[in-house]
Image: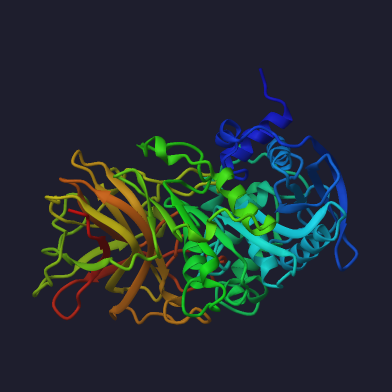
Amino acid sequence: MTPDRTTKALLLAITLGLCPNVATSLAQTPAAQYRVKMEFNARVPMRDGVTLSADIYRPDTAGRFPVIVVRTPYDNGTAANLITGKRWAARGFVYLVQDVRGRGDSDGEFYPLVNEAKDGYDTIEWAAAQPWSNGKVGTTGGSYLGWTQVLAATLKPPALAAMVPIVTPTDPDLNFPMQMGAISPSTVSWLAYIDGKTLQDITQFDLFGAYSTLPLRDADQALGRRFKAWRDWLDHPARDAYWEPQRYQRKILDYAIPSLHVSGWYDDVLLGTLQNFTNLTGPDAAPAVRPLQRLIIGPWGHGVNRGTRLGDIDFGPGAVIDLEGIQARWFNRWLRAEQNGVEQDAPVRIFVMGENLWRNEREWPLARTRYTKYYLHSGGRANSLYGDGRLDTIPPGREPADRFQYDPMNAPPFITDASFSQVGGPDDYRSVERRDDILVYTTAPFTEPVEVCGPLTVHLVAASSAKDTDWATKILDVHPDGFAQRLNDGLVRARYYQDATKAQFLVPGQSESYDIDNWATCQLFGRGHRLRLEVLSSAFPKWDRNLNTGGPLGDETKSIVADQTVHHGRGTESWVTIPIVPRPR
């Protein structure tokens, strides 16, 4: 039996994490309190005269109720939105899910991000003014739906009283779609998926083939399309004026909106959630903002709370939580003034992988963390899993450098599915680590459990024969049976490392120091486990291949092979900083 269009849309929404916790909430949601009234394709006017389409679910009774606004490019009329909207209305909320400008039944032209601040503001204020509204509005949603929330917040709509930004990307030039000169090729498949007014079937395309297109600018044509946004991104690899209207993080530091930030350790835009929470609880935020932030990070990918397994790893029955119930408690407090104790909750709730338990914390990063340097060592042959690369806490003496060749046309693969919906996971990298163009450094087995929980950074002293290249690192937990579980990774593009606003090319053969952000993890290394670091020059197709020529990014068709050198001797130490959290005895 072939699923109908509605069923396909629901399955797709769950798969992509666009409707978080659908399956779980159905089982855990309490009995309905209200009958539900539904209104479809309500027209919401924007300040420039364009009208956007909203489906509205509300209690079918007289009265004024708090409003939850969700703004999506993924079609507001899906079965997933119908189910979710009816559940929220039964709880006593108005649930308004809107097609963003140019998508679905909304008028106007879609271009990622640029209209979301003004359109979000106008939608929130319109909702607050309706006769069924109590004047308080909350927002929720994941991924792009998180972006729509925080961008609207930059304009400070008076009615916005609470947010739940889930797996929200950071500023768009810092990770998705662009990370300081490196672009994520899978964004072209995302653009294809949301091309036109309705969702597109891209399953029949050779997505990996599109990502390999040279020049990369023509990757959209490999999918039968031509995207202005894709080409604009490639035209603006540096942090310049193009990106400024789309950036939000510095603009919300003085906006005291209670915000529940949610992500997963394997969310491929985890950086945004971490930055948002640390920025809004840090010294740059206004004092009134800091106490209103909460953070939840689970053992999930970009589709949060989907199940107990991710890849080959089962995180146990506690991995799935009642996320909708948690959101309801959040909104009841801030939209209804219900005194339910939210303010007394721990600011941070994190899942410790390996131990597979949830834990409450007072801050992020954890104040009791012991940041420990593990130095790179070798006899000059750290190439591959079978080389002599080591990690330990003893600073090096005189040691020979390690060398490898990076050929962009034969780049070591980053393990991932082709779809943009989840980039990487807790994958086993043993098969990739057989290559000589990967340097592998590993500790001795731990004799006692070691908790690694916090930010991960790699300090690398390295040189290249090319005028531009990439340096990529990956941190892994090696199980006693050899399973090499990726925890997280990072990449820098050399030409933009010193200054994100303009290219500065390398002097071939001259050593430079790089500090590479590998984001964060929270993993208990069991007895007999080992810590591993990979050093290489690509993470394709998570990031586009650096062709080593120094030519215009996106327009190059030729590549050169680069001779890469990693130093780790006395005076040129390289290391990985590991956040070790003391275990209770």
x 74%, y 69%: residue: 157
Assign the N terminus to one quadrant of the image: top right
Q: Could you tell me how many numbered marks the image carries?
A: 0
Q: Nearer the viewer, residue 15 or 431?
A: 15
Residue 129 seen anywhere in this rendered image of the structure = yes
Query: Residue 579 occupies which quadrant of the picture?
Result: bottom left
Q: Which residue lies furthest to the left in this view?
A: 397
Q: Where in the figure is residue 395, as x and y percent of width and height? A: 13, 72
Q: Nearer the viewer, residue 208 or 317?
A: 317
| Image vertical order of residue 219 relative to residue 250, above or below | above
* Residue 62 appears left or right of 329: right
Residue 466, horizontal then vertical, whole percent: 36, 73
Residue 438 in view (yes/no): no
Between 174 and 455, the one lying in front of the other is 455
Query: Measured from the top left, where is residue 416 in percent x and y?
Result: 44, 45
Height in image: 321 above or below 259? above
Instruction: Single out the residue that lies furthest toward the top.
Output: 1
Q: Residue 33 in the image: state x and y as whole percent.
A: 71, 36
Whether residue 483 is situated above or below residue 500 in the rendered picture: above
The colour scheme of the drawn protein is rainbow
Say above or below: 290 vs 96.
below
Query: In screen coordinates, is 120 left or right of 529?
Result: right
- Taking the view exactly as shown, the residue that stands out farthest to the right is 49
Residue 104 falls left or right of residue 565:
right
- Residue at 84% in and 59% down: 108
- Residue 474, quarter of the rendered image: bottom left
